Image (cartoon, helix red, strand yellow):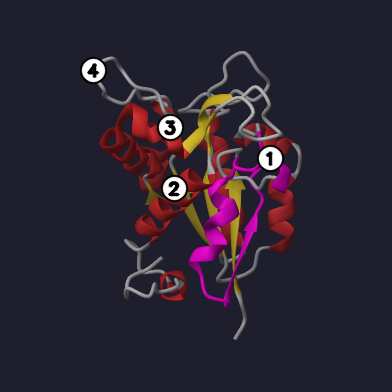
Amino acid sequence: MEKIHVYLAGDSTMSDYEPERYPRTGWGQVFQNHFKEDVIVCNHGASGRSTKTFMEEERLQQIDEKIRPNDYLFIQFGHNDSKVDSERYTDPFTTYKKNLRAFIEVARKKQAQPVLLTPVQRRNFEPDGSVIDSHKDYPVAMRELAQELDVPLIDITKSSTTMLAKLGDRSSKKLFMWLEPGEYDYYPDGEQDNTHFSLEGAERIAQLVVDGLKEFDFPLVKCLKESVHGGNV
């Protein structure tokens, strides 16, 4: 049986990290663990990239050269597209949507399945304990595009916001790079990072992606591993 390739296109919340940077982990780094051997996850996520710079650096072209019929392309951007004072910026309802269309077209022209994923919510709380909306119009624009082009969408902004609200300010720190000084050699001064995940956080986000994936009638869903408890990992 020919293996299914799942290509991931996104930013630092998705990307792979060197072992010395542990516990910093992208959710794409652990996504393979959810699948049987007939699926290969190809993580093209790259730190600091927006839809604009990802394409300018020909990273989308690299996927275009490899993706085949019946493969999948998971597309998740927003963190860096919103950075107004940088070359990475895209306007949510114009250039952001235009760029996302280019990713979708790469998949469709090769008879692969595009999947849009809204960006993961940052860990920021109001004094009353509610989660601050970090991404504003970018998830809105992506949801609009998904409807316009009839592309499956996994709403990670929504599900991660719900997760953070349930955990609360203190408990949610364990999912992100909140480290004490001297705890890890690579981070001698510690970290207080509300964007990037610890291993536990990456695993939780990967599970949210899997949960969203199950909502669709994809052949890929049949390739998910089953846990010893009878459910998916």
- Distance Cα–Cα, label 3 vs label 1: 18 Å
Q: Secondary structure beneath disc 2?
A: helix
Residue, disc 2: 205
Name which residue type carries label 3: Lys
Q: Secondary structure beneath disc 1?
A: helix
Q: Secondary structure beneath disc 3?
A: helix
Q: Earlier in the sequence, mark 4 or mark 3?
A: 4
- Distance Cα–Cα, label 3 vs label 2: 14 Å
Name which residue type carries label 1: Arg
Q: Which mark is residue 21?
A: 1
Above or below, comparing residue 83 to residue 5 in the picture: above
Q: Quadrant of the N terminus?
A: bottom right
Above or below, comparing residue 7 to residue 180 in the picture: below
- Distance Cα–Cα, label 4 vs label 3: 17 Å
Which x, y percent locates residue 227?
39, 72
Q: Nearer the viewer, residue 115 or 151?
A: 115
Q: Which mark is residue 173?
A: 3
- Distance Cα–Cα, label 4 vs label 1: 34 Å
Q: Nearer the viewer, residue 133 or 228?
A: 228
- Distance Cα–Cα, label 4 vs label 2: 24 Å
Mark 2 or mark 1, whichever is nearer to me: 1
Name which residue type carries label 4: Asp
Left or right of 11? Residue 61 is right
Label 1 environment density (alpha carbons within 10 Å; few <14, some 14–19, many ≥20): few
Q: Are marks 4 and 1 in contact (CB under 8 Å)?
A: no
Magenta highlight range: 19-47
Residue 206 located within the stretch drawn in magenta:
no
